[in-house]
Amino acid sequence: MTGWQVLFLLAASAGGGVMNAMAGGGTLLTFPALLVAGHSAITANATSTVALWPGALASMVGYRREVSEHRSWLKTLFLPSLLGGVLGAALLLRTPVATFERLAPFLILFATVLFLLQGTLSKTAPGPVASRTGWRLVLAWLLQFAIAVYGGYFGAGIGILMLAVLGFLGLKDIHAANGLKNFFGMCINGLAAVYFLLRGAVALPAAAVMIVGAVAGGYAGARFARRIGRTKARAAVVVIGFLMAAILLVQQGAR
């Protein structure tokens, strides 16, 4: 890699780490950056997954206080995150990415609108304990599994989708939701990353450079989100969600 490529990938991965810590969508920076650096779409996707995983770990450490206060949530969506991530990774290396790319902006847009309306909907929703029982729990499990499959396959916007599911389950603390979202994202992308590495689909030099940026950006993003407060953090989630949907729609229209 040339010097400018190293700096470019560092900047993209740092920005991706910050975005993932606050709401998700870091793939929308790292994936195109790897394409610009000359990698194929499949290699760029796999490398992006590997590079962003340590950043998710770093941002979860930044949210460790909030996550420790909501440990009971971890077991609810842990298994579907693992299973879906592996399945999505396997599908990526066996099928074209175009189908999920076409669906991505609409999934993100729907989740962002749902998250935007979450405050209004939560006034009539059952409390956190009741919302994790019965059909709501089954539906949340299935939704998380579907998100995990998409996350292992392509991944852009899974943070927004997971925040919507956590809101559906009754979790109203945006910082706790971000911490849990980062944990589940780490599960989804962790097994996918291992699968990509075992299959030789990762550009290792680029991944090594981007891990450094993703870790720094992930930890800094968690601290920044807590500092600006819950209201502004929620607003940032909505803005990032609409921005991601718009970027993907524009990319599709340019093809």
Image (spheres, rainbow, N blue to C red):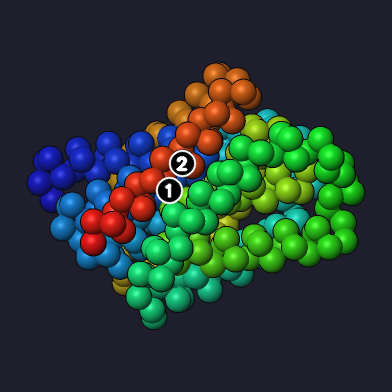
Residue 174: image quadrant is top right
From the top left corner, tell me how far across and down residue 68 is, in percent.
72, 37
- Quarter where residue 112 is shown: top right
- Would residue 21 appear left or right of 211 to someone viewing this image? right
Please report the residue visible at 57 percent of the width from the left and 57 percent of the height from the top.
Answer: 187
Please name the residue shown 46% across and 76% down the image. 90
Crowd around label 1: few <14 · some 14–19 · many ≥20 (10 Å): many
Count of labels in the image: 2
Mark number, residue 242: 2
Answer whether residue 219 is visible to the viewer in this image.
Answer: no
Instruction: Characterize the local packing of mark 2: few (<14), some (14-19) or many (20 or more) Cα atoms within 10 angstroms.
Output: some
Residue 108 showing in the rendered view: yes
Q: Amino acid at mark 2?
A: Phe
Check disc 1 and report its element: helix, strand or loop. Answer: helix
Quadrant of image for the C terminus: bottom left
In the rendered image, residue 13, in percent from the top left (x then y), is placed at 33, 42
Tell me whether circle 1 and circle 2 mark residues in contact (CB < 8 Å).
yes
Question: Which of the numbered marks, if any, corresponds to residue 201?
Answer: none
Q: Is residue 54 above or below residue 227?
A: below
Q: Nearer the viewer, residue 192 or 118?
A: 118
Q: Quadrant of residue 235?
A: top right
Image location (x, y in percent) of residue 139: 75, 63
Location of mark 1 (residue): 245
Q: Amino acid at mark 1?
A: Ala
